Amino acid sequence: MNLTHLDEKDKPKMVDVSNKDETTRVAVASGIIEVTPEVFEAVVKNETKKGPVLQTAVIAAIQGAKQTSTLIPMCHPLLLSSIETDVEELPELPAFKLTVTVKLKGRTGVEMEALTGVSVGLLTIYDMLKAIDKGMIIKNVQLEKKSGGKSGDFRR
């Protein structure tokens, strides 16, 4: 199996996508952050000292998706068409599930942008709540589905 990020001398390189067709590409990623019941209640009621946690996490997720190429060395800088977010309250755990959908028309996929958006959004929740819950668990950061491009569609 040849790795596309290595040249013939095993030197790292960014993949040349100039010959690929431009297609509409969409990726959806999600992740969960588990918190204590007290923290969950404080977030839902917007009673935390650092402000609106979930709204800030959404902004961070969007910013994270847009900055992926500066964080992940071999990612191409992309002109994203849209970034959508959804935060689901999971009181039975208790936890919050963040989902990020990224879309563009281009020559390379947006899976890394969706995954980075989720990761940065969840880390922002952790940062805003760490003073009251250091035991939070970030888990299940994963690609849910992607479409477009030569490799076709994927659905978890």
Image (spheres, rainbow, N blue to C red):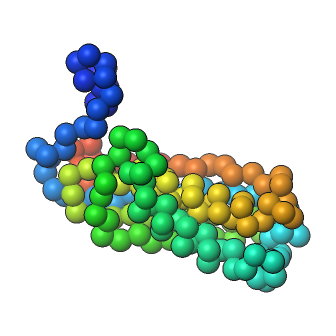
Q: Quadrant of the N terminus?
A: top left
Instruction: Name the side, left or right, on which 147 lies relative to 53.
Output: left
| Residue lying at the far top of the rendered structure | 9
Vertical side of 88 occupied by 11: above or below: above
Left or right of 82 on screen, residue 61? right
Kindly indicate the quadrant of the structure image that contains residue 95: bottom right
Q: In front: 108, or 150? A: 108
Q: Could you say where residue 6 lies in the image, as x and y percent from the top left?
A: 30, 25
Image location (x, y in percent) of residue 46:
76, 82
Q: Can you see residue 64?
A: yes
Left-right relation of 15 to 87:
left
Q: Residue at x 21, y 58 (%)?
A: 106
> In screen coordinates, is 148 left or right of 33?
left
**Front in this rendered view, residue 96 or 130:** 130
Residue plotted at (26% across, 42% down)? 151
- In this orientation, which residue lies closer to the viewer: 133 or 21? 133
Q: Residue at x 31, y 23 (%)?
A: 11
